[in-house]
Image (cartoon, rainbow, N blue to C red):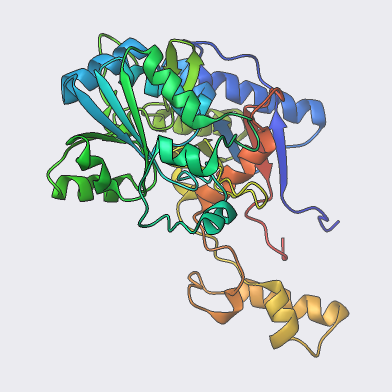
């Protein structure tokens, strides 16, 4: 019988992962038990995905605020440090800010406005328009901001991040000055030692500051090697980290290529089926109401099997039905579209019949699907099993 279902994404329940657990064995066992309990079979080119959080937890990839402080002090000294363009997040950045502040006598915190890099707002665009302020040329002190706009709490968390971040810095023992500006070089009016905390624009920001003569340290250059035996991430440093406790962070998993290859091999050995595997973090999608872009990790997927390289190579069925085969209907239309799909080129880039398909990497699309499936709360499904993703209308 013809299959009537396309892509299926299942959240897979797993035991709570602890440091030292064999993450590959846990994932494989959980996937196989889920398939048995639900009565479905593993297929070739299924996708098994595991969230970066449990991979890092199994690795014990944690670091204390003291380790952050020691690394910053060794690389920038302990006088006035500019901290620019952080995201507004208690989970993602506040604990890092505490460690950074412990290293310095004074922190000049420079925030972008009206929103941070991933869309969290300090102000609305309407507020700027009403005040007649151009965010690309205006520089505001905290005092001027308060005079113009008063207190503005985050619409979802209810946090006044200007006050909160100031309190974090002062509690760590540093003096604080807060500035709002959107050009990186504005920080050089206060200090030439700078930590740029932006994620996806970090390379450009670092280049601009270095060209202007600053000593620059990126978040990806803090804890990019162990400090007194701490966890680390050689590629991303503190980027992708999350608060673990009041005094520590969980870092992005380090070198997890062996994890995805190990899961792939184990499932092949046990079932005879070759699945694709990836580790995923934040999905790459934007909330249309709050305007928040989800991707606070440096990448959606830090590791994946080679079969997930590339972008979709798909025809747009709507385009074919409305154009090439607009005179056809019913079984005749189905057969014509099926034949076109079977005949399609291996590379459809630039072809009109692909117009409207999503031009993103497979790992970003699949990782976003996994993030939405597993959620970030108490679902208890850190593993996702996807079937039929590579199917098309003819399968």
Look at the image and tell me whether residue 46 can be seen.
Answer: no
Of residue 220 and residue 188, the one placed in the foreground of this image is 188
Q: Residue furthest bottom?
A: 327
Residue 42, percent from left and from top: 68, 37
Total marks drawn?
0
The image quarter containing residue 135 is: bottom left
On the picture, is 253 further left or further right than 365? Answer: left
The image quarter containing residue 110 is: top left
Of residue 132 and residue 328, the one placed in the foreground of this image is 132
The residue at the point 38 percent across, 20 percent down is: 169
**Quadrant where the N terminus is found in the figure:** bottom right
Of residue 124 and residue 350, the one placed in the foreground of this image is 124
Residue 386, percent from left and from top: 66, 42
Q: Is residue 367 above or below residue 357?
A: above
Q: Is residue 251 above or below residue 328?
A: above
Residue 219, percent from left and from top: 32, 32
Q: Residue furthest left?
A: 213
The image quarter containing residue 130 is: bottom right
Q: Is residue 77 above or below residue 138?
A: above
Residue 129, percent from left and from top: 54, 59
The residue at the point 49 percent across, 24 percent down is: 164
The residue at the point 75 percent across, 54 percent down is: 6
On the picture, is 364 further left or further right than 176? Answer: right
Q: Residue furthest front?
A: 147
**Quadrant where the C terminus is found in the figure:** bottom right
Of residue 196 and residue 280, the one placed in the foreground of this image is 196
């Amino acid at each position: 019988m013809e299959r009537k279902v396309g892509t299926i994404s299942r959240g897979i329940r797993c035991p709570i992962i602890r440091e030292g657990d064999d993450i590959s064995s846990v994932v494989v066992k959980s996937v196989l038990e889920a398939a048995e309990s639900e009565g479905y079979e593993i297929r070739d080119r299924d996708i098994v995905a595991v969230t970066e959080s449990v991979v890092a937890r199994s690795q014990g990839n944690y670091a204390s605020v003291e380790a952050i402080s020691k690394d910053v002090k060794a690389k920038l000294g302990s006088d006035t440090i500019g901290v620019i363009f952080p995201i507004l997040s208690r989970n993602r950045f506040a604990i890092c800010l505490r460690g950074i502040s412990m290293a310095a006598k004074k922190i000049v915190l420079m925030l972008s406005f009206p929103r941070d890099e991933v869309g969290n707002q300090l102000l609305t665009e309407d507020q700027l328009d009403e005040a007649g302020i151009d965010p690309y040329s205006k520089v505001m002190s905290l005092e001027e901001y308060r005079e113009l706009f008063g207190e503005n709490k985050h619409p979802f968390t209810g946090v006044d991040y200007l006050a909160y971040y100031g309190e974090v810095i002062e509690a760590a023992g540093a003096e604080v000055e807060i500035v709002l500006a959107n050009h990186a070089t504005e920080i050089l009016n206060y200090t030439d030692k700078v930590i740029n905390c932006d994620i996806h624009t970090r390379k450009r920001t670092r280049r601009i500051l270095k060209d202007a003569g600053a000593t620059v340290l990126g978040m990806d250059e803090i804890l990019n090697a162990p400090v007194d035996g701490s966890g680390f991430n050689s590629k991303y440093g503190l980027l992708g980290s999350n608060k673990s406790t009041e005094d520590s962070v969980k870092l992005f998993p380090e070198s997890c290529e062996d994890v995805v290859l190990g899961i792939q091999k184990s499932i092949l050995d046990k079932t005879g089926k070759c699945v694709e595997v990836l580790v995923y973090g934040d999905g790459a999608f934007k909330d249309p109401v709050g305007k928040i872009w989800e991707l606070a990790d440096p990448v959606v997927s830090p590791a994946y099997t080679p079969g997930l390289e590339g972008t979709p190579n798909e025809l747009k069925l709507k385009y074919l039905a409305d154009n090439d085969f607009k005179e056809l209907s019913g079984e005749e239309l189905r057969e014509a579209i099926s034949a076109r799909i079977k005949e399609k080129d291996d590379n459809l880039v630039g072809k009109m019949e692909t117009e409207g398909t999503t031009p993103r990497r497979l790992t970003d699309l699949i990782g976003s699907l996994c993030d939405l499936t597993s959620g970030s709360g108490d679902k208890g499904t850190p593993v996702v099993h996807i079937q039929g993703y590579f199917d098309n209308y003819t399968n």
